[in-house]
Image (cartoon, grey):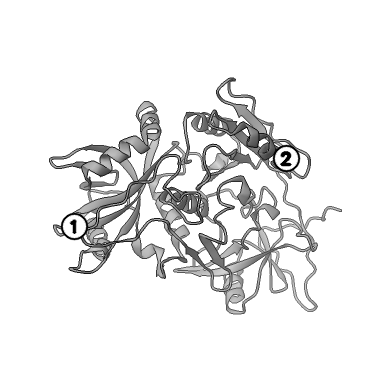
Amino acid sequence: MRAPEHALEPSEPQVAYEIGGQRWNKGTTGFEEAVAQAHEQHLRPRCLCQRDTQGQGIEMYVARLLDGYIVKRMPNTGSQHATACPSYEPPADLSGLGQLLGTAILENPSTGTTTLKLDFPMTKMPGRSAPPPASSTASSASSQGNKLTLRSLLHYLWDQAELTRWQPSFTGKRSWATVRRHLLRAAENKVVGGHPLLASLYIPEVFSVENKDAITARRLQQWTRSRPTSGSPQPLMLMIVEVKEIVPARYGHKAVIKHVPDQPFGLDDQLYRRLARCFEQELALWSAVENLHMLMIATFRMTDAGLPNIVELSLMPATAQWHLIEDHFDRQLLEKLVGEGRSFIKCLRYNAPTSKVGVSASLTDCGASPHFLIIERQSFNKDESAGDLERLITSEGQRPWVWNALVEPLPKIPVKGRSYIEPLLFKPASGDQLNWGSRSTMQTSRT
């Protein structure tokens, strides 16, 4: 059985749960069995990072994955957790996630599955041309609606994979293998059009000359799902990859993908022209900064000749630490945070327009309350931005940090505080014994 919940990176804070009247420290002997039993008995664990509105731990639920179980936060409860808790996430309204929850993203704690509604097709009718790619600013004509565009799906999976989180101990530990593993895990129990997302999702393995034949065989086996059938809609594959280059081919253009050196992906001339127009800013940034990754999320199909052709795509650059960024200002801020050894969560825009104020990052090392960091850009609607900033004042009266990137240099980052997880006292049911685990120590609750 796999280690439950957030065991994605080393050096995480100690996390404790109440399960069936007992306290368990995550990762200690017997914890995995307790989580499995909670799933079988339909019990709701409680995270003991701090109290909820009823004075208890924060309610969680257990979902079953392919190789074990995972303790997950209940929908829309991430902001109730302590900022140092791995289950904490900024309020959904701080990004574009809020407008998609309950509409494009339907989480069912009873089954542990999440249904996703997409605004792009996952099949292609014979003879029909490809739709235009998602644009860099609006993702598609319906981006203000209640469905996931290609770009917002990438943001969602990045969030779910916890690749938006950063702390100093992660330095040097994120590679493509790590990114791939986290994304595949994030896609588990996600359903699209009644089918598991994993069945259609291709994320390339790390290429190895020694294992080339085995890697190629696994890749081709997965791609058989998209083989054309005469007279029937052709299923499309979805891929998340790192682009090495996009260059002219003998006919049309081709995308060369890192870790897939032996198989280019075709783009027709129309799609290539749209690509250059829609993602001019992203491509310019990628060209100018050597250590950036360029990520592509795309649908593709297999031709009659057995070759992959891209149908629709979206591009987004990422830093050396694999943080998705919008522009040069975003990159400056994140490099500053990483260089100063800060802990933070990168907030993503999803379908929200660039004219709307959004939090770029949320510092999680400033004590009990997060500190929101905002980059003010020329595209902001000035009449709306003042009201948006007022709504971002925390319950403690803390105002967000704002950088007017067009008129001033990067300001000083708010200082670190004491990351605090409230040691919530837990009273067991009569006759039960507390399981403190091998490394746990009892603390007194705050009054």
Disc number at residue 303?
Answer: 1
Residue found 61% across the figure and 51% down from its top: 92
Answer left or right for 91 relative to 254: right
Which amino acid type is marked by label 1? Answer: Thr
Give the distance between the C-alpha atoms of the residues marked 1 and 2, in whole angstroms: 53 Å
Towards the viewer: 42 or 282 = 282
Q: Residues within 10 Å of mark 2 (few under 14, many from 20)?
A: some
Q: Is residue 130 left or right of residue 177?
A: left
Task: Say which element carries label 1.
Answer: loop
SS assignment at label 2 = loop
Is there CB contact under 8 Å for labels 1 and 2? no
Depicted 3 relative to depicted 33: above or below: above
Residue 261 pos. (x, y %): 23, 45
**Depth check, front residue: 154 or 93:** 93
Residue 281 location, quadrant: top left
- Rendering coords of residue 68 (x, y %): 49, 69
Location of mark 2 (residue): 393
Measured as percent of width and height from the top left, residue 392 is found at: 69, 41
> Residue 394: x percent and y percent?
73, 42
In the current view of this chain or complex, which residue is farthest to the right? Answer: 447
The image quadrant that residue 406 belongs to is: top right
